Every structure is written in structure tokens, then in C-alpha cells.
Image (tube, rainbow, N blue to C red):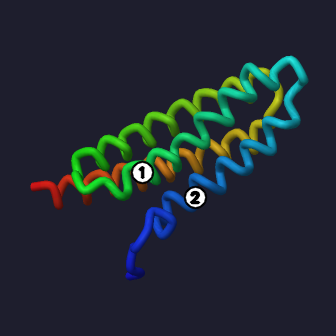
């Protein structure tokens, strides 16, 4: 088991960053009128998930870090919503939509595991 010395060492953080970078690229292919609507929304929420993990990392109060993990979970759910809208609007093919959704679900499970781990330390 590898030692976690920084939020950057968290597998879920790395997966969320990679997902954000791919979604960012995808959003740049949207029609021009979507660049500041759906494009901006999906770029911001997909970036907010790993950012919330980073923000809470150095807090000495575990409950505040758990709150950051919960906010990251919410941002993952928002990202899934925007991906669904992208799919329904035809900006994303079904196979790619299912792949992104699956990766979001995986990250959600990892965040839930991190939350449980932190809660056990808070007791």
C-alpha cells in the first residue's frame, strides 16, 4: 500500500484530474454558442471535484476535509448531469457518454470510500 503524503497521491484525485482534462477538451468542440453556457458549466464542475479534495487536504479538522470530499462528490454528480445533457444534445456519442459516466461513478465510489475512511478516523 503506497503512502499518501499529499492530495496528489490520492488515486481518486488523479482520476478526477484526468477526467477534467478530457472533458475540457471535449467542451472545446461544442458549438460556439455553447462555449459559455454548457461548456463553461461542465469545465467548472469537472475541475471543482479535484479542487475540493485539494482544498480540504491540509485542514487539520477531519470534519472539514470530509465536507470537502462531500462537495467533490456533488461536483461529480453535476458533471454527470452535464455529460447527460451533452449526450442528449448530440455533442457526445453514446459510447463516450457511457464511458465518462462509468468513470464518474467509479470516482464517486472512491470518494465514498475516502469519506468512510475519514469518518472512522474522526471517531
- Near mark 2 (Cα within 10 A), the count class, few <14, some 14-19 or many ≥20, is some
The residue shown at (43%, 49%) is 55
Q: Is residue 43 above or below residue 5?
A: above
Label 1, label 2: how many angstroms apart (C-alpha)? Answer: 12 Å
Q: Is residue 13 above or below residue 5?
A: above
Left or right, residue 43 beside residue 75:
right
Q: Quadrant of residue 84?
A: top right
Q: Position of residue 71 (x, y in %)?
A: 41, 37
Which of pointers 1 and 2 indicates the residue nearer the eye?
A: 2
Q: Is residue 58 above or below residue 99?
A: below
The residue shown at (64%, 28%) is 82
Quarter of the N terminus within the rendering: bottom left
Q: Position of residue 120 (x, y in %)?
A: 17, 58
Mark linked to residue 15: 2
Q: Earlier in the sequence, mark 1 or mark 2?
A: 2
Q: Quadrant of residue 46?
A: top right
Which residue was labeled with disc 1? 109
Q: Quadrant of residue 26?
A: top right
Amino acid at each position: 500500500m503506497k503512502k499518501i503524503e499529499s492530495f496528489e497521491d490520492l488515486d481518486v484525485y488523479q482520476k478526477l484530474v484526468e477526467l477534467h482534462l478530457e472533458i475540457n477538451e471535449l467542451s472545446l468542440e461544442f458549438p460556439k454558442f455553447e462555449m459559455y453556457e454548457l461548456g463553461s458549466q461542465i469545465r467548472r464542475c469537472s475541475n471543482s471535484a479535484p479542487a475540493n479534495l485539494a482544498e480540504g487536504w491540509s485542514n487539520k479538522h477531519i470534519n472539514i476535509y470530509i465536507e470537502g470530499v462531500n462537495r467533490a462528490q456533488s461536483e461529480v454528480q453535476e458533471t454527470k448531469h452535464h455529460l447527460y445533457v451533452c449526450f442528449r444534445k448530440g455533442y457526445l456519442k453514446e459510447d463516450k457518454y457511457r464511458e465518462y459516466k462509468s468513470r464518474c461513478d467509479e470516482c464517486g465510489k472512491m470518494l465514498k470510500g475516502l469519506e468512510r475512511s475519514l469518518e472512522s478516523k474522526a471517531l
